[in-house]
Image: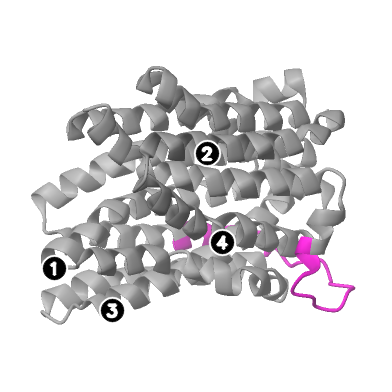
Amino acid sequence: MIFTGDFRRLFVGNSVSLLGSSVTTVALPLVAVVALHASPVDMGILGAAGFLPHLVLGLPAGVWVDRLPYKRILVLADLGQLVLIGSVPLAAAFGVLSLAQLYVVVVLAGVCALFDAVAGQSFTPMLVPREQLLSANSALMLTSSTVNVTGSALGTGLVALLAAPLAMIVDAASFLVAALCKLRITVPGVPVAVRHKADLFGGLRIAFTHPVLRPVTIAATLGALGGQMQNTVLALYLIHVLGFSPWLVGVLVTVAGVAGMLGALVTPTVTRRLGPGRTFVLGMLVSSLAGFVLVVGPALLSQVFRGVGPSLYGVNQQTFRQTLVAPDQVSRVNAGWRFLVYGTQPVGALLGGLSGTLDLRVTLVVSTALMLAGTALALPVTRSS
């Protein structure tokens, strides 16, 4: 598939910044634990801080993004993250780094990432023809899965060679490269003139009144809730119940990443054969069963399910929003979706942690049931195929 030059610039910029962010995913917790001696409570606050922008600004972002050209938002978001991430190794070099600074960096970088995601998803339909949207979203999903695998390995290597704060220079530099790539996009991405009064809940109202988007949104929200419950206890279950060593857990995490890459590669073909609705439901079903398979079957198969499923449903749910929503409303719908899906993940983490203290197997089964309920509610979208 040959994409437009502007989409390729967006694609390369996103890929580079994702690679840098994968390094920070490894390095930032180590900065907190090793350099700043963070406690478990400190780490919990740091983890929750990353979700805070979605809860507080998730809905307003959809309205605000419509006020500026998408290209300008993307470039400003990258430059903002360049400054924020770059401040960590700079402060460490001068011996003034603190946990308070890390909290501020994580929250503000999350704000930049939120606006970048909403603008990018709304910009993509302007950069590729409608018939190429599925392939474009698959390409973005593929690079995300690939980067998650390679970036974590790169981050581990850099942290081993350098101090953890210095490794974050790679992430800061990646945002500079990303901003330069997006500056070269020739289309400004001016949003369609908003004909309706700004409404914080407009995106949610559209999503919940559309016959296709409603079940997709509900399924994605329940899937995110159950999925985060599983993610919270996954390492504990693998180590304490199955007796796996830490390095084997790392191998299984990599397996899920590779499976995600393969899933993104085959999603366009599967979608053409089954239709977008059936492929979305298939992806939800596969993802839902990952936890149950882990309880009754091989962990390797569970991780394959955990990787393939999100690619199948993720590409199609994004394409649904881009093709079924009017151009002057797509930003608000994208923001509302992120508010629900990302906003429920802290709740899922809390539920997973609390239930995991009682019984890890029960947590996996309950979360599977929750995800299967979402899959069942998504069945009406199979009629859209």
Q: CA distance from mark 1 to mark 3?
A: 14 Å
Residue at the disc numbered 4:
343
Q: Are marks 2 and 3 in contact (CB under 8 Å)?
A: no
Task: Point out residue 284 in the picture as x, y percentages from the top left corner.
Answer: 63, 33
Q: Nearer the viewer, mark 3 or mark 4?
A: 4
Task: Point out residue 201 in the picture as x, y percentages from the top left corner.
Answer: 76, 70
Image disc number at residue 37 = 1
Point out the stretch of residues depicted in magenta.
179-204
Residue at the disc numbered 3:
101
In percent of the image, x 77 and y 44: which residue is there? 215
In percent of the image, x 67 and y 51: which residue is there? 124
- Lower position in the chain sequence, tag 1 or tag 2: 1
Question: Is any atom of residue 143 visible in this view?
Answer: yes
* Residue type, label 1: His
In percent of the image, x 24 and y 43: which residue is there? 154
Task: Point out residue 136 in the picture as x, y percentages from the top left corner.
Answer: 63, 39
Q: Quadrant of residue 339?
A: bottom right
Badge 4 marks a residue whose secondary structure is helix
- Lower position in the chain sequence, tag 1 or tag 3: 1
